Image: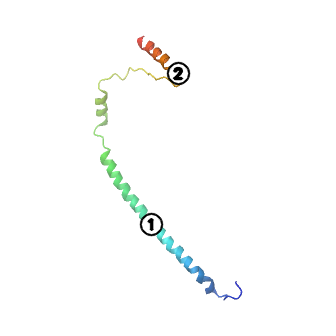
Amino acid sequence: MIPGKGSSFYSLIRPGLPFIGGLVALAFMVGSMADTRHRLHRIKSLQSNAYYDASMKIPDAPKMLNDMLGNRDIDNWDNLRGPRPWEDSRAMQTEQRKVQSK
């Protein structure tokens, strides 16, 4: 205790009471702000899901792929690659032409 000052219980509580009141008020404010944030996020996610469900529907994907590919022969294909940065591109092209001509 501070000598010369009153040593009553109220002299200790009176300076700390505004601080404690502020902490309680902040706790309620933060709780209401978090509740509002979660509520708005839930509404926004429901709206975005409805948007994506409506816009992302593909009518018939296998039929569309079949139309794009047509009657191509997809069973017989050659795996051709471009030259690597450390390889000579002209040498690779001549090598590929030799393989294709056989």
Rendering coords of residue 38 (x, y %):
42, 61
Work out whether mark 2 precedes mark 1 in sequence or the reverse, and give the earlier one: 1
The label on residue 86 is none
Which mark lies nearer to you, 2 or 1?
Answer: 2
Rendering coords of residue 3 (x, y %):
71, 86
Looking at the picture, which amino acid does disc 2 mark?
Answer: Glu
Q: Can you identify the residue that label 2 sits on?
A: 87
Instruction: Specify few, some or many for label 2: CA neighbours under 10 Å numbering under 14, 14-19, or 20 or more.
Output: few
Name the residue rendered at 52%, 74% in the picture: 24
Rendering coords of residue 102 (x, y %):
42, 10
Q: Secondary structure at mark 1?
A: helix
Q: Secondary structure at mark 2?
A: loop
Name the residue rendered at 50%, 71% in the picture: 26
**Distance from Cα at disc 2 to Cα at disc 1:** 61 Å
Nearer to me, 58 or 24: 24
Name the residue rendered at 30%, 43% in the picture: 57
Q: What is the quadrant of residue 62 in the picture?
A: top left
Instruction: Specify few, some or many for label 1: CA neighbours under 10 Å numbering under 14, 14-19, or 20 or more.
Output: few
Q: Quadrant of the N terminus?
A: bottom right
Q: Can you identify the residue that label 1 sits on?
A: 33
Nearer to me, 62 or 20: 20
Residue 96, placed above or below residue 67: above
Name the residue rendered at 45%, 66% in the picture: 33
Q: What is the quadrant of residue 66 in the picture?
A: top left
Looking at the picture, which amino acid does disc 1 mark?
Answer: Met
Q: Is residue 13 left or right of residue 74?
A: right
